[in-house]
């Protein structure tokens, strides 16, 4: 495992339903940033738009762009997009390595409040990526409200949440991110978008990385939220406070 893993999230204002413009924005914003991993928000190519038949990838165009970006920058990159596959739509979280290999997680908890559950199909598998020795759990937005699914079974070191979480419910976002870090004794990086979307919803600056004790370990400079995962710090904390040994067991169906 790399002792330190530098992680950088881009909390930008997503151009509504405009993939080409968002690809351009991301390339420009990250061109001078050096990191081990770049994180992009939920549905970073279009915004959280509930008519996937109009905007969903049908030829893996977002994945192809991410593979090209990862190879060129020699940096892993991740984020979610609307994808059409096998006659179904998915809110799919891609994690792409610098060599082009990729992992994918389909959002399990669909946001029924906006009808996401009527348009998209839910994922069934929990996905943990091993990157530079770090075991990283992939999660999307609404998943944050469901702690059983993210329970740490000594199988991950960090959780990534990508989101479009609006201002009117931002206290829940902040509180639950911190709670997930404390209860799972892991780094939790929550990346939210900013600005105003096509539904006139406002998104404040609200991206953070929490350490296992609930402290904020990220900093914001311009549009970049950055944090460094430290393996010795995490190992020492877990060995000192062995709370996970007393956790309840669950069977997820």
Image: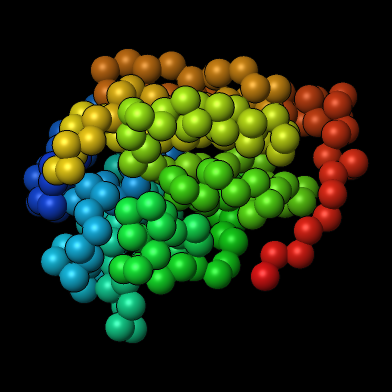
Question: Image check: 67 left or right of 137?
Answer: left
What percent of the width, then of the height, locates residue 166? Answer: 33, 34
Question: Image check: 198 left or right of 92?
Answer: left
Residue 213 sits in quarter: top right
Can residue 203 be spotted in the picture? yes
Q: Residue sitting at 87 percent across and 33 percent down?
A: 242
Question: Image check: 75 left or right of 24?
Answer: right
Count of numbered marks: 0
Task: Specify how the rendered protein is coloured.
Answer: rainbow
What percent of the width, then of the height, locates residue 122? Answer: 46, 68
Quarter in which the C terminus is drawn: bottom right
What percent of the width, then of the height, locates residue 223? Answer: 27, 24
Can residue 30 be spotted in the picture? no
Q: Residue sitting at 60 percent across and 49 percent down?
A: 146
Task: Out of 10 and 205, give the one closest to the viewer.
Answer: 205
Quarter in which the N terminus is drawn: top right
On screen, 135 above or below 115? above
Residue 116 sits in quarter: bottom left
What percent of the width, then of the height, locates residue 137? Answer: 58, 50
- Residue situated furthest front in the rendering: 113
Q: Residue sitting at 90 percent across and 41 percent down?
A: 246
On screen, 181 above or below 120? above
């Amino acid at each position: 495992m790399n002792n330190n893993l530098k992680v950088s999230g881009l909390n930008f204002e997503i151009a509504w339903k405009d993939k080409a413009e968002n690809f351009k924005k991301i390339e420009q914003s990250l061109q001078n940033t050096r990191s081990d991993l770049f994180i992009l928000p939920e549905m970073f190519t279009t915004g959280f738009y509930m008519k996937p038949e109009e905007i969903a990838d049908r030829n893996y165009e977002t994945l192809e762009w991410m593979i090209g970006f990862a190879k060129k920058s020699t940096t892993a990159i991740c984020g979610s997009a609307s994808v059409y596959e096998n006659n179904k739509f998915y809110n799919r979280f891609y994690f792409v390595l610098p060599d082009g290999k990729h992992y994918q997680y389909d959002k399990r908890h669909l946001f029924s409040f906006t009808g996401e559950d009527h348009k998209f199909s839910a994922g069934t598998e929990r996905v943990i990526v091993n990157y530079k020795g770090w075991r990283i759990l992939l999660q999307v937005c609404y998943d944050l409200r469901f702690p059983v699914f993210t329970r740490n079974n000594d199988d991950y070191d960090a959780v990534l949440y990508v989101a479009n979480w609006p201002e009117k419910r931002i206290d829940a976002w902040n509180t639950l991110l911190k709670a997930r870090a404390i209860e799972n004794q892991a780094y939790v990086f929550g990346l939210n978008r900013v600005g105003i979307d096509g539904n006139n919803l406002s998104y404040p600056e609200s991206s953070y990385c929490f350490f296992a004790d609930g402290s904020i370990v990220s900093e914001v400079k311009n549009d970049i939220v950055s944090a460094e995962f430290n393996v010795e710090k995490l190992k020492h904390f877990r060995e000192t406070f062995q709370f996970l040994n007393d956790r309840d067991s669950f069977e997820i169906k």
